[in-house]
Image (spheres, coloured by chain):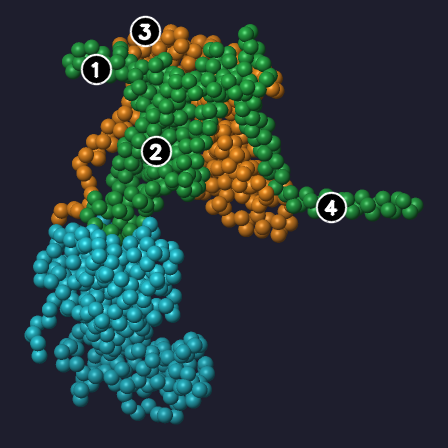
Chain colours: A green, B cyan, C orange
Amino acid sequence: MQTFKVMGRATENLREKAKKFLTKQAHLPYVGPISLWIIVFVFAPLGVILYFSLLTIGPYGQIIHTFTLENYLALVKVGFAKVFLRTILFAFGANMVCLLIGYPIAYFIVRHGGRWKTLLVFLVILPSWTCYLIRLFALKTLTDSSGLINSALLSLGLISSPLGILYTPYAVMLGLIYTWIPFMVLPIYAALEGLDPSLLEAAVDLGATPLRRFFTVTLPLTKGGIFAGTILVFIPSLGEWLVPLLLGGAKNMMAGNLVSIYFIKAGNIPAGCSIATALTALVILIIYLCMKLGGEEALERIV
Amino acid sequence: MGNRESILCVELRNVVKRFPGVTAVDHVSLKVEQGKVFSLLGPSGCGKTTALRLVAGLETLDEGDVLIDGKVINDVPPYYRDCSTVFQTLALFPHMTVEGNIAYGLERRKVPKDEIGKRVGKMLELMELGGMEKRRPTQLSGGQRQRVALARSLVLNPKILLLDEPLASLDRKLRKEMQVELKRIQREVGITFLYVTHDQKVALSISDIIAVMRAGKLEQIGIPNEIYETPRTKFIADFMGAINIFSGKIIASGDGKVQLETESGSRVIAPENKDIRSEEVTGISIHPELVELLPVEAGLEGDNRFRGKIVEMIYQGDFIETKISLDQTGEPITAYLSSIQDRESQFSPGEEVLVHWSLESSNILLD
Amino acid sequence: MRSWKITPKVLPTLVTLFYTFLWAPAIVLIVLSFSNNKYGIKWEGFTLRWYAHIYNNVGVRNALTSSLFIASVTVVVATIAGTLAAYGLYKYKFRGRKFLRTSILLPITIPYIVTAGALLVFYTQVIHIPLGYPGIIIAHISFSVPLAVFVVLGRMARIDWTLEEASTDLGGDRLTTWRKITLPLLLPAILASAALIFPWSFNDFTITYFVAGLGTTTLPIYVFSQLQYGTSGPVINTIGTIFITLPFITLLLMNFLQKKEVT
């Protein structure tokens, strides 16, 4: 009899403790599933890549499970470095052009858009909602030697032989800009829209000509938008694969292409993983630098 | 005694400004004298802010002329005009320090760096902002921000300072303090103020001249006493708090007095004004604080004495708002009973009283 | 009266050029899809035969069905998971909250190609699931949940949560409050995220291509293979036109949803 009573009290104690614990964990049913998902399907695969990057393949293409750094050492070779450098250059160049074109566009929409503002903004966003394989294909068709641009220029007599636009570095840049410019225009537009017009009036009232006002007031106050745009353009461009594949050809490969070549063509998973890891490291480094320069606020704004 | 004609700092000649659907400024003409505080007073939407912005150059005129210092400046852009605006929202640059904000106009004028430093320093002293130079606007209190905005405009030594309801966002106590500050600074620097406000108390306390605006037009210009004690229209009377407004016509005159009969039949006596034709008079207004409440026994002999019943007494802290209904005509009268009077007389709702105001308290209305 | 506001004449021209540049390829594509040219590269008269062709084409139909299936499953799972996650993130303070918030963003920050490769290796070498629908759907969910989370989170900040309190005060338990109050309040955001996720999943190429394996073909993959074999330009033009009209449909949907939100 005694023992039952003691047991009863013990289980009640436990139940109390469990209840208290559970109410404290009220968030679990909400964030639990997604946390588990992220661990299994996001963190794990990334860990796996890291793991495999430290392995090599044998003569028959099977994976040898001994740790080695030879994949990374191979990366230091000139060929790879060239590709990575080209990747950074292309991405950065595309980013700058997007900024130089995107800012005036956003400015125009905000200042002179009037009733058409929303329409103009949507016309910029909509392309980014289209399958970008199709967009790139369309661009390719247009710039091909038998494509419209060339036939138009030829028939107008402005050129004597078709311009070799495709398969040049310019084509890759063009493709990058074409794909990512909406993401530069949008944050800058948001930043400009949020500008307090009385600040602009104050500047002019205090003696700033419109040009000076732009550089001393408008530009500094839209810095956040510029940084947000940069993060949304520069980072994805670094990881690009399809643009160089379709528009660049073998001579204008970016880091992403290397990954796919090793994974698919060569079937060399460890090597592919090492390039993937290197690319990820590069991206994280650039994100870190951008945050340092632009501050956390830029990220908050995108989110 | 000096020049016959005072120096005109700013002048508006028949200025018109239209926006789609409304004429914001409708043929307004005014003259602002050098060194004076000129207020544009009126309810929101009356066009006073637009008029100010026309002087600043932040709006372009449709008709008429704006002159600063005798020169027509209609086509001159705001950054070349010799006036400076203190905005309602203050518009302090959030990305610059206090120093940076104050120095902004000077930098745009290419003033040499050391001179900028000196002038900014002096201004910081004048505004009692010492020690705040490196702070950002968000780190300042409301009153401090106010002073930075003022400093920023004053450091440029403009011919005229344009102020657009700068005290609107401050709490009551701070507003009173800043009013005094503004007046002091204006006197010290000797600069001309064009002040826009909807608050008649502010206008009365700081202005040398008040111009009341309604629906784009000027209704009355005068010194504060005139505007308060002798408003010329029902609108202005009401706006200035002379809430006892009766429509009526003059039925007799003589002996330096005129008698007006209101629509409900009350007979009010007002002083005669030779400059006004009897036919033009449309009513009378009396300030509630000028209405005296006496016990019924005091008697009905004399001007402007009426019997009435107290309908309501509302405690307002510094006075008691008392509403009386006149026995003979049912006309409502409001009196502001001071605390002293109340203690002496101990009136209460439902009581019969004698309502009285002096001859001079009756104000003739022309519209 | 001269206006002193800054309006360089150059700007409108630049803007027109920009929009032309942005839309010309798409418009050309749409036009060419109606062209009677064998290679689909220039205009040779109006025809609908290519549309008839893809209507009858089994490959296209299967690819379309696959894409729709994957997108539908993704939308359902991702919106549910995302909404729950957003709710948890907004309402509760717990250890690792900031970390979770950043982690959710991870799939989007890392280059697609890296995630694609990572998943490929993970599926084949570690958990050994066959490439195809399961792998694709898992990948799509990972990418779509962030979208759902942030759309719903954004809306949550603007909701009056005292309504939930009122519900509990009047006697509603957790489940009832969720059903009657929370869900209806969040519905516009949930639908909005669905409207964003569906096209994203439908459009995705890179990730899907890597983890699809040999047996599964989505519409973008179909287009890519056509591209590689260089066979049918017109077919790609027609399918491309379908892809281009998708965003407009999404836009109309979102507009419709916004109107519903107002009432």
Q: Amino acid at mark 2?
A: Met
Mark 4 chain: A
* Rendering coords of residue A25 (x, y %): 64, 43
Q: Nearer the viewer, mark 2 or mark 3?
A: 2
Q: Residue furthest left?
A: B4
* Rendering coords of residue C160 (x, y %): 51, 49
Left or right of residue B41, residue C85 in this image:
right
**Mark 1 falls on what kind of element?**
helix
Identify which residue, B295 or B266, lies in the foreground: B295
Q: Which residue is the site of mark 2?
A: A184
> Which numbered disc covers residue A152?
1
Mark 3 chain: C
Looking at the image, residue C179 lies above or below residue B153: above
Mark 3: few/some/many CA within 10 Å (<14, 14-19, 20+):
few
Looking at the image, residue C102 lies above or below residue A274: below
Q: Which residue is the site of mark 4?
A: A17
Look at the image and tell me whether residue A134 can be seen: no
Verify CB contact (< 8 Å) between mark 4 and mark 2: no
* Rendering coords of residue C143 (x, y %): 50, 28
Q: Residue furthest right?
A: A1
What residue do we see at 30% from left, 26% from top? C22
Q: Amino acid at mark 1?
A: Ala
> Which numbered disc covers residue C38?
3
